[in-house]
Image (cartoon, grey):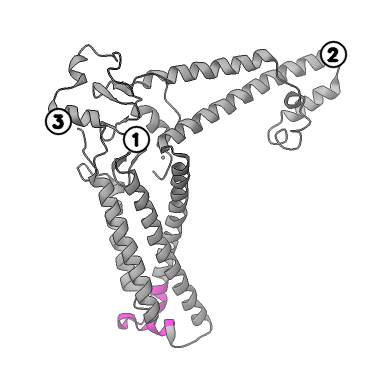
Amino acid sequence: MRRRNGLQPPYNPSQVGTWILLPILLLQFALFVSPILPLSAAIVCTLCVFVCGATAAYFAYKVCSIDPIDEKLRLHLQDNEGPGKSRQNGGPAENEEEGTKFCWIDGIDVYSNSMHCKFCNKCVSNFDHHCHWLNTCVGGKNYDYFFLTVGSTLSLVLSRGLSLSGLVIAYFVQYDHRKTGGIVERADKWFNADSGLIIMIVNGSFLLVDLGCIALLTQLFVFHIRLRREGITTYAYIIRDGQRKRDSARQKMEFERRRLAAIQQASADGNWIKKMRLQAAGLPHLGDGICFFCDPIRTEPAPSNANENIENEQDDESDSSNNDVCDSDEQHYGMMSGAVGDQSSPTTSDEKES
């Protein structure tokens, strides 16, 4: 089934969890924090928290309500006519239009910046990632709202965290000094329950939740600020990061191959000092730290044939990735399933085509 947006069933547990968590956070603040704060602070903090909560809910709704589907696929679904009609035998034909590629799953040409999402079962224009918390794809049409959702949600938990931390600290300072009145008295008289300590334990528990959310959302928000400055998507970043890791692993393998050959040559020449330097530099942690600058392999220039082999392997990977076939969701979800807030290793090249 092709999902239009995040408001269409089926809903996932993460999405339902956000629907439950946001009202709980607002209700807890209204019942357990606002009545205990001094009046002036209560008005300011409550307004700030509820405004941030409302804006977060609004922007999240906008993200979920917008369909980021590829425009060519949208027109094809509307008209039931399009490039897919002429592709009954399968396989990508010559692109009829510059900047397009063929999607095997949807069976039509889509724009080159589109990716197919297995969760929504459609190609998404300028695909960034699939957000499980909102249960929708984030693409060019709704990315700005997603960014604002992250920012407003971070503002919400920051406002709550600051208010709760100030309240909890002030209460226990007064409680420890056996002071009467103020926060301690208001907490004890909360709804005439005479249980101020229990209320502060509840607030302290929610403060821990807020601190965890602040840490995760700050990391996510800073990450997307960096992406916006570089002008790339989450998917493009992960592809680039994976390529860097593969290049680093390939270079490390080449170093080790040269190291083994150099150790054998040093043994044959009877150069025991060089052999010991090579062996010490090859030790884990020690070689990359203390012995890094005295490593003969790193200080001596690499043979020209070794550089040529690495460049040839990189060119082969580049050629294999530069095709006109829509990249499969299997690849980017393999790499993104542990990531961005919402984000396993790349799949094989046989799985790369969709």
Q: Give the residue type that dot 3 points to.
A: Gln
Q: Which residue is mark 1?
A: 127
- The quadrant in which residue 207 appears is bottom left
Question: Counting residues from the N terminus, which is met first, the one under dot 1 or under dot 3?
Answer: 3
On whether residue 185 falls in the magenta region, the answer is: yes
Q: Give the residue type that dot 2 points to.
A: Asp
Q: Which residue is mark 2?
A: 269
Q: CA distance from mark 1 to mark 3?
A: 21 Å
Please identify, in this view, whether the residue under mark 2 or under mark 3 is nearer the observer: 3
Residue situated in front as seen by the camera: 287 or 177: 287
Q: What SS does tag 2 mark?
A: helix
| Badge number at residue 298 | none
| Badge number at residue 78 | 3
- The quadrant in which residue 58 appears is bottom left
Q: Is residue 326 above or below residue 30?
A: above
State the image coordinates of residue 204 (x, y, percent, origin top left): 43, 68
Q: CA distance from mark 1 to mark 2?
A: 57 Å
Q: Which residues are magenta?
A: 183-200
